[in-house]
Image (tube, helix red, strand yellow):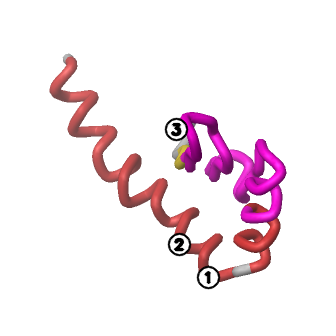
Amino acid sequence: KDIEYIRSYYFNKKEDTRFSSSVGKFVGFTEQGVKYAAAWNKDASKLSAMKAQKEVYCLNHVQIDYNNIL
């Protein structure tokens, strides 16, 4: 329940744009990143795909990882 999926995009070693499942949208950190985020946030299919990544990468593996740690 408290798992967060984060996908960051970098340019010249600086974080440009980030998708966070807790925010539910892209956030830009540079001038160009803000432009990318605005464009990507307008695309409903891209947002849906990114939101689904939490289930694909996190929720399906957390129980396996948790059991391996214990």
Q: Are marks 1 and 2 in contact (CB under 8 Å)?
A: yes
Mark 2 vs 3, N-terminal side: 3
Query: Is residue 18 a member of the stretch shown in magenta?
Result: yes
Res 55 quadrant in image: bottom left
Q: Which mark is residue 45?
A: 1
Residue located at (83% from left, 51% from top): 31
Q: Nearer the viewer, mark 3 or mark 1?
A: 1
Q: Residues within 10 Å of mark 2 (few under 14, many from 20)?
A: few
Contact check, label 2 and label 3, Cβ < 8 Å: no
Could you tell me which secondary element the residue under label 1 belongs to?
Answer: helix
**The magenta segment:** 8-36
Report how far apart the C-alphas of labels 3 and 1 lie in the structure: 22 Å
Specify whether 55 is left or right of 32: left
Find the distance from the CA under tag 1 to the CA under tag 2: 6 Å
Residue type at tag 2: Ala
The earlier-in-sequence mark between 3 and 1 is 3
Cα–Cα gap, marks 2 and 3 = 17 Å
Viewer-proximal residue, 33 or 47?
A: 33
Give the residue at x 37% y 60%. 56
Q: Nearer the viewer, residue 34 or 27?
A: 34
Q: Outermost residue toward the front?
A: 12
Amino acid type indicated by mark 1: Ser
**Residue drawn at x 60%, y 75% as measured from the top left:** 46
Task: Give SS at disc 3.
Answer: loop
For label 2, the residue is: 49
- The picture places residue 24, in percent across and down from the top left corner, at 70, 56
Crowding at label 1, few (<14), some or many (≥20) Cα neighbours within 10 Å?
few
Amino acid on which the number 3 mark rests in the picture: Ile
**Which residue bears the numbered disc 3?**
3
